[in-house]
Amino acid sequence: MAEIVLDHVTKRFPDGALAVDDVNLTIADGEFVILVGPSGCGKSTTLNMIAGLEDISDGELRIGGEVANQKSPRDRDIGMVFQNYALYPHMTVRENMAFSLKLAKADKATIDERVNWAAGILDLTDHLERKPGQLSGGQRQRVAMGRVIVRTPNAFLMDEPLSNLDAKLRVQMRTEVSRLQKRLNTTTVYVTHDQVEAMTLGDRVAVMRGGVIQQVGPPEELYDRPANLFVAGFIGSPAMNFLPATVKSDTVSSPFGDLRLPDARRRRLQASGGGERTVIIGIRPEHFEDAELVGDKRDQGTVFKATVDLLESLGSDKYAYFTVKSERASAQHLEELAADAGGVETTTEDGVQVTARLDSASKAKEDQELELWLDLRRVHVFDPESGENLTVDTVEGGDEAEKPVEKPVEKPVEKAAEDAPAKP
Amino acid sequence: MNTTPRQRVGWGAANVIVVLVAAIPVLWLVSLSFKDPSTITDGSFYPHNWTFANYRGIFDQPLFTHALVNSIAIALISTFLGVALGAMAAYAIARLDFPGKRLLVASALLIAMFPAISLVNPMFNLWRTLGIFDTWVGLIIPYMTFSLPLSIYTLSAFFREIPWELERAAALDGATPLQAFRRVIIPLAAPGVFTTAILVFLYCWNDFVFAISLTSTNNARTVPAALAFFTGASQFEQPTGSIAAAAVVITIPVIIVVLLFQRRIVAGLTAGAVKG
C-alpha cells in the first residue's frame, strides 16, 4: 500500500511527440483514481510510466515516498491488469497466480494459501487446474486480477481491464472490481475510455486530453462543475447539449430565449469579461423537464416550446429529441469530442438536435409540440476559444452554495450489487 | 466442394504418377542395397537373393562409421549453435527497434540466397591457410552461416506471435528479463524453436557441396561426401551395393523426422505467412 505522486511528469517519444505533458497528480494511499479520456490522450502512457514499462522523460514519480523513475518494474512492487489480460497461456490458473510468488521465492505453503485465498475471493476455486485457453472471457479477467492480488502489491494498475468483455459481463465485472478494491483498500489507478466506468468506479476521476489533465475531482464534481467544454462533453451520457449563445448585459441570448441566470452564475460570468460576446451554453438532458410536471420550481427556469422529433421511453425516464433553430456550436474541444464519438453529427438541416430527459409521467408525444422547462440554475456557459467554464467555480471542493441537493449521477444499481452476496 | 467421379479418377491418376516418379528411385536404391553383388546388374527391380551383406559391410568400414559419427556430431552442433544464435537475433528483430534492423534482415536474406558453390573455392584456400580444413569446425562454420538466415526468419515469425504484454506482465510479476525470456517466452516459442531445429538439422545433414570440398580424410568427412569414396570388396568390383546401403541408412533419420513432424515443418515454412 502506498501513495503515488506524479510530479510534473512528462513523456516525450523519440520522434518528438509529446504524449504526456506536465502531469501532476497525487493518488492517496488506498484511493481509487480513474484516468479517462479519448484514445491517444496519454492515459495509458501515464499508467505505463507508473508501472515502469515506459521511461519518464521529465519530472518525478514517487511511490510510497521513494523516487521510482529509475526503478525497474519488478522493483516497484506494482500489480497490473492488462487490457488483453496477458495470462501465461502455458500455465494453469494456479501457476499463473503463483508465478509472482514463486519468483519472490515464497515457500510453498504461503503460495498455496495466497492462491487459494485469491481464488476464493474471485470465485475461481473450481478452475485452478485449467489453462487460460479453457476459460471464458470473464474468468480470464478474474484470473488477471487474481494474479495481481495474490501478493498484495503497493498499488493496482488497470489498463482498460473490462473493454474486452461483452456489455452485460462488463457491468457485472465493474461491480466486482469496485467491491474488490474496497475490500483490499489498495491504491488503484484505472485507465478507461468509458466515462460510465469512470463515473461509477472512482473515488476521483482525472480527465485527460492531449496529454494534459483537464480536471481532477470526484465524479459528481466533474459532472456538476466541469472545468471546460471537453470535460462537460466527455462526462455524462447522453452527452450535454451545446448551443451557441450571446452574452448581453445581464442575460444570455440563446435559442431557448433570453436566459436570466441565477445571481451567482451571472456574477462570475460578468467577472470573466464584459460586453457582448459569443459563448457556448451547455445543458445536460436531465435539466430539461416537461413544463407540466415542474410544479413550484417553475420560476427557477425558463419555459419554451419545441416539437418532439423522437421519443424514447426507458421506463424510468423518457428521452425526447427535438431540434432548435441554431448554428452548431463550434469549438476545438467539441471537434475533438465529436471525433472521439466517431464523428456522429448532431445537427440536422433545420438546426441542432437537443436531447432532453423527461420524467416518465410526461405525456410528450412524437411530432407534437411540447412545452419544456429549462433549469436555469444548471446552465453552463463556456468560452468558445479556451473552452473554459465561465459560470462555475471548478476548484475542487469550492462552490458549496451551488451544490445541487440531489445527486444527478445515479449509482443505486452499483450500490445494490455491492451489498448482494457473491454470485455462485 | 463436390467432385464428379471423373474428376476423382483424374486426380487419383495424377497423384499416383507423381508418387511413382518420386518413389521409384528411392525404392530402387532400397532394392539395390539388399542385392548381392552378383545380381546387382540383373535388371530386376525386386532382389532375388536377399542379403544384408551390404549393410554389414558398410558398418565394418571405418570410412562409413567415422563419416556417420562426423555427420551426426557436425549436424547436431551446427543446429544447436544456429538455433541458439538465431533465437537471440530473432528475438531482437521481433521485439526491438534498433538502427540497422532492416539491413540485418536484408543481409540475412541475401546470405540465404547466395549460391554456396561459388564460395567453395575461396573457402578451400582460406580454410587451408587458417588450418581448419578437414576439421569439424571447418564444416560447422559454413553450416551455421547458411542456416542462420533460415532460423532467424522462422523464429522471428514465431516470436512475433507472442504478445508483448506477456513479458510486461512477467516484469511486473517480478521477473528479470532473463527469467521472463526463459520461463515465459521460451516455453511459448518451444514449438517454433523445435521446428527451426528440425529444418536446420535437415539442411546440415543433407549438405554435399561443403562436405566434399572442405574435407579430405575421415577426420571430418560426412556421409554424403563419404559415399563417393566407397570401394568394392576388390579393386575391380563396383561398390554399388554398399553405396546404396549407406544412402538408405542416412535417409532413415530424415524420413523418421519428416513423418513425425511433418505438420510442424510445414508450420515452420509458412510461419508468419498469413498473419503479421
Image (cartoon, coloured by chain):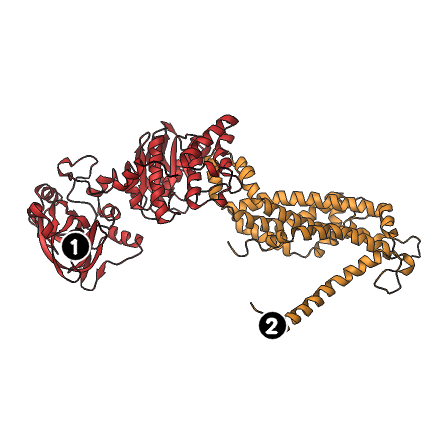
Chain colours: A red, B orange
Q: Which chain carries label 1?
A: A
Task: Identify residue type, mark 1.
Answer: Pro
Task: Identify residue type, mark 2.
Answer: Thr
| Pointers 1 and 2 within a single chain | no
Q: Position of residue A206 (x, y in %)?
A: 29, 40
Q: Residue furthest front?
A: A424
Q: Mark 2 lies on which chain?
A: B
Q: Give the crowd class for mark 1: few <14, some 14-19, many >=20 residues within 10 Å.
A: many
Residue B4 circle label: 2
Against A4, residue A11 (above or below) is below
Asked whether A245 or A376 is in front, the reply is A376
Q: Where is residue A156 in the image (x, y as percent from the top left)?
A: 38, 35
Count every numbered label the image shows and give the total: 2
Asked whether A251 or B89 is in front, the reply is A251
Distance in Å between CA atoms under marks 1 and 2: 72 Å
Q: Which label lies toward us, 1 or 2?
A: 2
Q: In this view, does A345 lie to the left or right of A56?
A: left
Q: Where is residue B106 in the image (x, y as percent from the top left)?
A: 57, 53
The quadrant of the rendering that contains the C terminus of chain A is top left
Residue A179 circle label: none
Asked whether B231 or A1 is in front, the reply is A1
Quadrant of the rendered structure where residue A28 is? top left
Against B256, residue B39 (above or below) is below
Q: Can residue A214 be seen in this view?
A: no
User: Circles 1 and 2: CB distance less than 8 Å?
Assistant: no
Q: Residue at x 41, y 30 (%)?
A: A153
Against A61, residue A362 (above or below) is below
Q: Give the crowd class for mark 2: few <14, some 14-19, many >=20 residues within 10 Å.
A: few
Mark 1 lies on residue: A244
Q: In this view, does A77 lie to the left or right of B32?
A: left
